[in-house]
Image: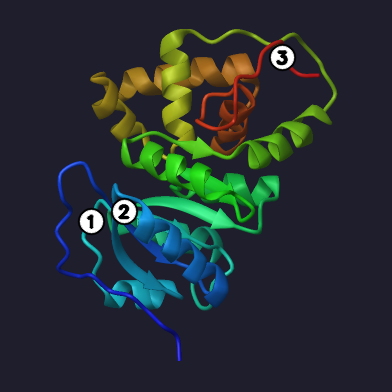
Amino acid sequence: MTEERSTEDAVTGPGRVRVAVVEDHPLYRVSVERVLAEAEFVELGAVVDSVARFHVHRQPPGSVVLLDLGLPGVAGAAAVLEVCELGHHVLVVSAQAEPDVVLGAIAAGARGFLSKDVDAEELLIAIKTVADGGAYVSAVVAGMIIKDNADRPVTAAEVELSPREEQVLRLVAAGERDVDIALILGIGVRTVRGYLDRIRDKTGERRRPGLVKEAIRRGLIGGSGPRRGGRK
């Protein structure tokens, strides 16, 4: 029988972050639960093995959810989308860290992506970053995407983005919709789309997954590190 933890009625204390776990590997799930239970800023919520069981526990909206992708039932980007639609902030922790998988998860709304070899310290940093409204991709995952991108032939020198364009690109990579970006930045949706048009023209990336990859390559997501000097 799968061991689960549920705290449906838990109240998050001042400065604490409610965190849930959706992970089907028993040993890894127990290890992550132990790390979270020992973290002073974490209010541990549901710890379950599938998205279906997560629904049952009615986790309060606004939680950070550590989500595996290789789950029984709803899995992959579909699992990310379903949990995001419940009003949670998804931080993927997965052994599947190929560039297309990462970009698909972020495009579905994930605010961060970690490989399963991440240590406890980085896991907690990522949780805090996501809880504060930021985005986080571990250096290992970012390195894979950058390497994949570096294999493409160079056709032109990299064009610098303005500070506002970088803000918009960072929010796109965090899974925000155009209307949400407008609210966050206090500008109109048409203005956001104007910035996106300029970003697409400068980067050559037309689709959202490509823009996510570009944000990671430029070091605009926490954990990926600054990337200077263009493609190599």
Q: Residue at x 52, y 74 (%)?
A: 24
Q: Mark 1: which amino acid?
A: Pro
Q: Residue at x 49, y 37 (%)?
A: 136
* Mark seen at residue 2: none
Res 227 quadrant in image = top right
Q: CA distance from mark 1 to mark 2?
A: 5 Å
Res 25 quadrant in image = bottom right
Residue wearing tag 3: 230
Q: Residue at x 64, y 53 (%)?
A: 117
Query: Badge 2: few (under 14), some or many (20 or more) residues near its Cα, within 10 Å?
Result: many
Q: Position of residue 53 (x, y in %)?
A: 36, 78
Which mark is first along the chain, 3 or 2? 2
Query: Badge 3: few (under 14), some or many (20 or more) residues near its Cα, within 10 Å?
Result: some
Q: Mark 2: which amino acid?
A: His
* Mark seen at residue 61: 1
Q: Residue furthest bottom?
A: 1
Residue wearing tag 2: 88
Which mark is first along the chain, 3 or 1? 1
Measured along the vertical axis of the image, is residue 97 above or below residue 155? below
Q: Position of residue 180 (x, y in %)?
A: 30, 34
Q: Are marks 1 and 2 in contact (CB under 8 Å)?
A: yes
- Residue 164 seen by the camera: yes
Which mark is first along the chain, 2 or 1? 1
Query: Badge 1: few (under 14), some or many (20 or more) residues near its Cα, within 10 Å?
Result: some
Q: Position of residue 107 (x, y in %)?
A: 51, 45
Q: CA distance from mark 2 to mark 3?
A: 34 Å
Q: Position of residue 171 (x, y in %)?
A: 41, 30
Res 139 quadrant in image = top right
Disc 3 is placed on an element classified as loop
Q: Mark 3: which amino acid?
A: Gly
Q: CA distance from mark 1 to mark 3?
A: 39 Å
